[in-house]
Image: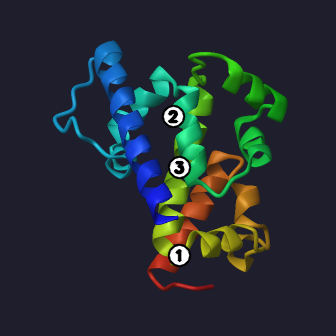
Amino acid sequence: MEAVKIKSGIAIDKAVRVLVNRVEQDRGYKLLNKNITYDEFLKNRMLIVHAIREGIPYDFFDLIKEKTPFNEEDWASFLGISTKSLQRNKAKEDFIFKPLQSEKIFELAEVTSLGNAVFDTEAQFYLWLNTPSFALGNLQPLELLKDSYGKEMVVNELNKIDQGIFV
């Protein structure tokens, strides 16, 4: 299991570097650290802005999807498309998500990264996402991830949990 996580981490870091190279060529954004990791990428807001405008290739999305607790139906709902469209996009060679969809993918990647850092295990984070929260109006945090305002509420709640502030 640990070997699979390491292999997955290497693959996503490599995909980040490919995306960064594309952003550098097409957008003129220069990055000093050419060996950037996925975690470093998620902390570089300006790079994310350029990557959103460039669009995310499906194969990179697939690697992000593996790191999140969301299933195909969740992703389709978050991206505002049907599961069939998501599957068709996967079958297309060199499919690139539109900027709005790319932005949503990165938002959910950030939430997942934060959630995994706050909770001891991915299973605990997933349980929290699917449990109604009093602090979030008795809604499941997962339900709130469908739009940016809800995502910000979830991020704020995760930060409060991380700081030991419970409602």
At 72% from the left edge and 57% from the top edge, which residue is drawn? 144
At 69% from the left edge and 67% from the top edge, which residue is drawn? 129
The answer to which of 143 and 156 lies nearer the viewer is 143
Q: Which tag, 1 or 2, sits closer to the chain's start?
A: 2
At 35% from the left edge and 22% from the top edge, which residue is drawn? 23
Asked if residue 167 lies left or right of residue 158, the reply is: right
The answer to which of 115 and 11 lies nearer the viewer is 11
Asked if residue 104 lies left or right of residue 26, the reply is: right
- Separation of residues labelled 3 and 2 (CA atoms): 12 Å
The picture places residue 20, in percent across and down from the top left corner, at 33, 29
Callout 2, which amino acid? Phe
At 75% from the left edge and 68% from the top edge, which residue is drawn? 130
Rendered image: mark on residue 109: 3
- Mark 1: few, some, or many residues within 10 Å (few <14, many ≥20)? some
The picture places residue 96, in percent across and down from the top left corner, at 57, 21
- Separation of residues labelled 1 and 2 (CA atoms): 25 Å
Q: Which tag, 1 or 3, sits closer to the chain's start?
A: 3
The answer to which of 73 and 111 lies nearer the viewer is 73
Colour setting: rainbow
Which residue was labeled with disc 1?
Answer: 119
- Separation of residues labelled 1 and 3 (CA atoms): 15 Å
Callout 3, which amino acid? Ala
Element under label 2?
Answer: helix
Figure check: 161 above or below 65: below
Element under label 1?
Answer: loop
Element under label 3?
Answer: helix
The picture places residue 163, in percent across and down from the top left corner, at 44, 80
- Mark 2: few, some, or many residues within 10 Å (few <14, many ≥20)? some
Which residue was labeled with disc 2?
Answer: 60
